[in-house]
Image (cartoon, grey):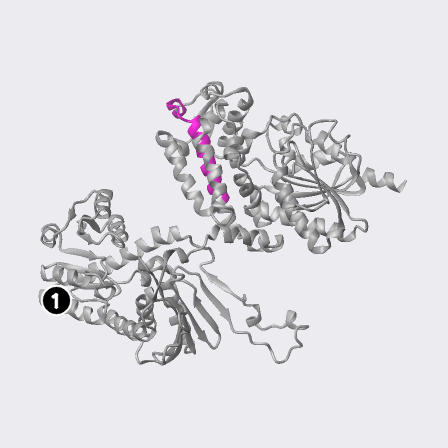
Amino acid sequence: MPIPVVVAGTRFGQFYAEAVARNPRFELVGILARGSQRSVEVAERYQVPLFTDVDQVAEVTKFVCVAVGTQALGGQGTELGICLLQTGLDVLMEQPVHYRDLVQLARAASMSKRNFHVGDLYLNLPAVRQFVKMFATLSAISPPTHLVCELANQVCFPLAHLLVKMTGGAKPWSFTEAVAEPDAPIVQLGGKIAGIPVSFTVHNTVGAEVADADMPLLFGITVGFGSGRLSLRDPHGPIEWHPALTLPADTLIPADLGCHPSTLLDQDTTCFIPPNPLSLREALARQWVDALSMDMDAWRKSTASGRAVGLQRAFAAAELWHEMTSRVGAPRPVAAAAMGIDWETVEIARLRSMAWPQIAAESNVTSVASAVAGLDRAAELSMAALLGMHAELRTGMLLADLLDSVEVCPATAHIPRRWIRRLQESGWLTTVDGLVQATPRLRAHLDDLWMAADRAWEEAKQGWNHRLGSPQVLSYFRSHLENLADLMAGKMNAVNLLFVEGSTEQAHALYRDTMIAACLNQYIGAHVAELAAECREGLRILEVGAGTGATCDVILDNVNDLDPASLAEYHYTDISSFFFAESRARHRGDGRIIHHVLDLQDPRAFIQLDSQFNVVVAAGVLNNVVDVVEVLSRMRRVLAPDGQIILSEAFQESALMLLTQAFMMSEAYDLRAATDTMFCTHDQWLASFEAAGLSCIEHWPPDDHPISVLGQRVYILIAPENQQQEEL
């Protein structure tokens, strides 16, 4: 039978409540608190009674998790723990606990013959457990030479707890005098732990209103060995191993290093364990709860054995903690408004500033592919939600009946057909005896498809955010789920989801702040700069469908870094003047930038251009025209003999694009009509280039590149016929 448990406290206690709820060996039977609104909501969340008196608790359980601040933090957790123990209840106490409080609690437990256990979720986190194992393995080979620790004052106890565990007690220890500049947030402390030289960098600040509101970090440890450095950057990881650099004495450096036989030289400069990043949401919602669950299991086992497991380690940690904090001094209060930065802004700025090879090199093929798969699943379930709300799909429906069941307008009539084909290709639908039928994979969700789609978007968010792009872009994609029926019926224009109330903010995020946009734009910018370096008279560039200027701005940055004089003219064109005001504001005073309206699908548009261009750029434009070959032929006619056309385009029909961009596209009449697709494949692009009299001399990324799975590519084209005429 599960052990009934009551959780005392509802701030950090919420983590304990969730850990109890998830652990089948325990049952949450109540919340003990003062009766605040938060405690009422927590009790309602877990559908358990709210107790305000210890005697009420004793009637329903013998086990209480106390997540209330102890005397050391100005709370009443110590008194509550003693009261519970004296009442005849076993107690799991959340740290930190002062040494003198531990003595009182341990005495109360002994006199009452009850079990008392001090928890520490940090010791149970996967990265910390792995770090402790690696430290033990390396220490058995050669003793550590030094320790370097960086920490926030608020987590000094768990760091002390970890040092005690790593070193088998941490004694003997000694410390020098702490050093800090007046009003400085950093305090330096030196000394020895278990005889190992150690230095601490303590961020000695605390939130003025809520203590944990100012925590620039948790803690990190670097251990020096003769063979290298082992680092735990954060309790959640990663763990890094940096091998020591030992240059062979018998080798010419660097000429002969490439053929030197030493295996030490073949080690990576940095090894990451685990290799993939973890979001804070994942850490708090999964790892912290799992770690507390492990604490509870240890408490349960110690109760069954009658031995207070780990209590001596808690005493040593409390003593070490007191010694460190008394030397460091009280933390300086910091107002909440003075802390925190917008990580999304930092990450976007980083992507925009990096060169495309660097962005590409940082891309992990497994994580990118996994993130894309999650997005595809979310998009496909969204499609199925609109198509699949029919019990008949369990046994089968005629395709015509399934299509007729969706309210569509003439402009979107072709979209459901393509959705169905996509769902068949992905294994959600199948055709049996001429009837479209849900596969077991889809039947499992038929009763709650909208909820399943919503859950899939939440899961996809973990792979998207700060890896593939801005959270704002994912919100834009997801907005289509909320408006699918109206989009399909023509009651809503998809353009309004991209330009909410006429704002271009969403469009800027979509075309600038994604990994694929950053990669392709940087690639184009670098390539145009190479052309500019070879052009004596200054490049004349035409960009069609320039839109938000995402590609234009990167090109200008690259060319200006080379030499502003290497650009003669930049014709910034779009189907309307909607974006021109923003562009003129960004490029105010730059006489090289010329704005004018140009409709790619108007046969007269290119005739009006009386110039020939060294470069014609079209970024994410041509899949939107109804005849790619015809438009490419017009572009070729305004190309200088040595000119190049640079395209960035999708080369596969992703589920995400069928759910979003498809609503802003017209049905094509070119090669795509034969395959009933909205986006050209790579082979169709090559065939279209040839039909338009163009040759593809380069494309990127290649199929084996990590970001190729994102389904977009740059194509560099030339017109051999133009070059031949120039030679004649």
Q: Which residue is mark 1?
A: 108
Q: For the magenta stretch, what is the residue range?
A: 372-394
Callout 1 crowding tier (Cα within 10 Å): few <14, some 14–19, many ≥20:
many
* Residue 213 sits in quarter: bottom left
Counting from the top left corner in percent of width and height, residue 10 is at 24, 52
Q: Is residue 89 visible?
A: yes
Where 221 falls versus 56 (above or below)? Answer: below
Q: Is residue 391 magenta?
A: yes
Is 40 placed left or right of 401 in the picture? left
Residue 108 falls within the magenta-colored stretch: no
The amino acid on which the numbered mark 1 sits, given as a three-letter code, is: Ala
**Residue 304 in view:** no
Disc 1 element:
helix
Q: What residue is shown at x 44% (from left), y 44% (from top)?
A: 461
The location of residue 23, given as percent across then percent down, is 25, 50
The quadrant holding residue 209 is: bottom left
